[in-house]
Each structure stands twice: as C-alpha cells, then as structure tokens.
Image (cartoon, rainbow, N blue to C red):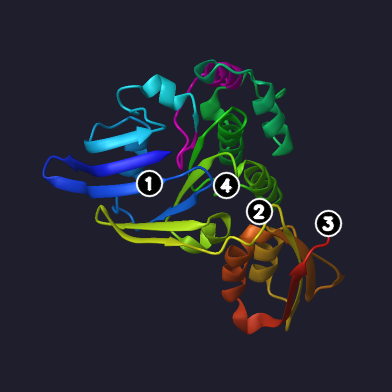
Amino acid sequence: MIILQGVSKSFRRTTVLQELDLEIKTGDRVALIGSNGAGKTTLIRCLLGEYSCDGEITLDGKSPRKERKEVLSRIGFVPQLPPPLKMPVQQLLDFSASVCGCSTEEMASVAEQLGLGLDTIKKRPFVKLSGGQKQKLLIAIALGRPTNLLIMDEPAANLDPEARHILFSMLEKKRKETAMLISSHRLDEVASLVNRVIELDRGKVILDDRVDDSVELSSLLNCTIKTTRIEPAFSAAISSWGFSNQDSETEWTGTIPGPDRLRFLGVLSRYAALLATVNIEESRQ
C-alpha cells in the first residue's frame, strides 16, 4: 500500500532522511519511534505531501506530492500538536468532510463516543478549545471518515483513561481494513497497539521488526493495588486513572485499557517502594 524507495530529505546542509526503503501494507500497525531529530515528523510530512523529497513515495500507486488531494482524501491524520485554527468547530467539520466527500455524521458520532458533545462547542473557534477537546475532535475527524491509512502522532496523549479505551476499541474495528502509522518517542506508550516497530535514528531505519499483537485493542484489565501507607502523590496519580479507594485508604481498585498496561506499570514503578500488592487480571466483559 505504502512504498518508499530511496527516500531522502535535506534542509540546507542537514540531511534528515537518508535513503529510506519501506513497504507498509494494509493491516500493518506500525510504531514509528525514535528520539527528537530522528526524522519521524519529516517522514510523516513527506507521506502527507507537505514536503518534496528525493526518491519515490506512493500510496496505492499515487504520489502524495503530485496527487495530494486524492491521497489526502483517504488519510486520517491526528497531529501531536493541534494546529492554531481559528475557524469554528462546525466549519472545521464541514471542511474536513468535504475533503473526502463524506458527511459529518460519523465524525460527530465518534466525538460523542469519546465524550465530546459538539452541540455546546460547534460555534466556538477550534483554537479556544481545551487540549483534551482538541485531541478528541481531531481523532473524531480522522476516524469518522473513510480511510485506508491512519497516521497518528501521540494520538492518546491528552486523553483520560476512559477515552483512551474508547479510542483503542475504535482502532480495533479498523485494524484489518487500514494501515496505521503511530509515531511516538517511547515504545512502551504504543507497544500494545502495534504489530510492527520501525525505529529511526538520524534519518535511517535501524530497526524494522514484527512484534506480538495478541492483545485485543478493546480489552480491559481489572486492577487492585494495596499500598503500605497513605501517600498524597500516589493518590493523585492513581485517581487520574479513575481508581477509587472506597473500602480502604490504602487499597485502590480500577480498570485500565489492555493496550495501556505498559504505560500503567510505568506509572506504578515510580512508587515501587510504596506498593504492597498489585493484582491485574483480564476483565470478563
């Protein structure tokens, strides 16, 4: 579906991408990882046709630079940093739908599922929304339209755990019919979402490997945590995941999205000396 042959990109004397050869097929869910300056954002912008480059890029045989309108009509894109758009929310939805020749109904449906009610914000400028509202709206626009390719840069960064679970469930439904490219600085943030990892370093591919994808994106995990004492910092951190301690001030219970297990364990690791027991098991939905 996506083919890159000898793709290079330089800015003045700085080479950002160096002779990339890649093929990404429908059904591939790729984690694009690497440190700042590795070339991830530049690669994404080349795929979107924003940058010209040496070599050749094709999406279903079409050039994203030469046939940009047609290519973009089949791509759902969630940027890491929301653009500073001043247009009202409804106008943004109408414009996005017109690009791919669809209606805004599915976009509105996705937004509602993520917990974003459009009725109260449709006349507000996009730039005036909160960070979480912007993220949910951009996800709704990307997933609420027919796509062959989803490009997402830290897509769940500003989402609460419940919204993250809903997003993962939506991606589960699209996993067989689309290719997904998920950019992140950290593999543990996206490891359970993908079946392939591509790592860039100084514009070169240093790792391209298949990974286990047995975790269902819509899965949930029940978790019980007991601590040795009351700690306000831990209470604040675990509460942000939707956990509660109704029975005891040192026992917390909650549910986490299956794909978030590594991210969640990373949070718990900060309080390792405080933990007495941690029990995590698959939820029987």
Identity of the amino acid at label 4? Asn
Q: Image point 67% across, 60% down: which residue?
A: 258
Quarter in which the C terminus is drawn: bottom right
Marks 1 and 4: CB-CB under 8 Å? no
Q: Earlier in the sequence, mark 3 or mark 4?
A: 4
Label 4: state its secondary structure. Answer: loop
Determine if the magenta segment contains residue 111.
no
Picture coordinates of residue 183, whole percent (x, y): 44, 49
Q: Earlier in the sequence, mark 4 or mark 2?
A: 4
Residue sitting farthest toward the left: 13
Horizontal side of residue 193 vs 169, given as left or right: left
Which of pointers 1 and 4 indicates the residue nearer the eye?
Answer: 1
Which of pointers 3 and 4 indicates the residue nearer the eye?
Answer: 3
Q: Which residue is mark 4?
A: 158
Q: Image point 62% across, 41% down: which residue?
A: 174
Label 1: state its secondary structure. Answer: strand
Q: Which residue is mark 2?
A: 217
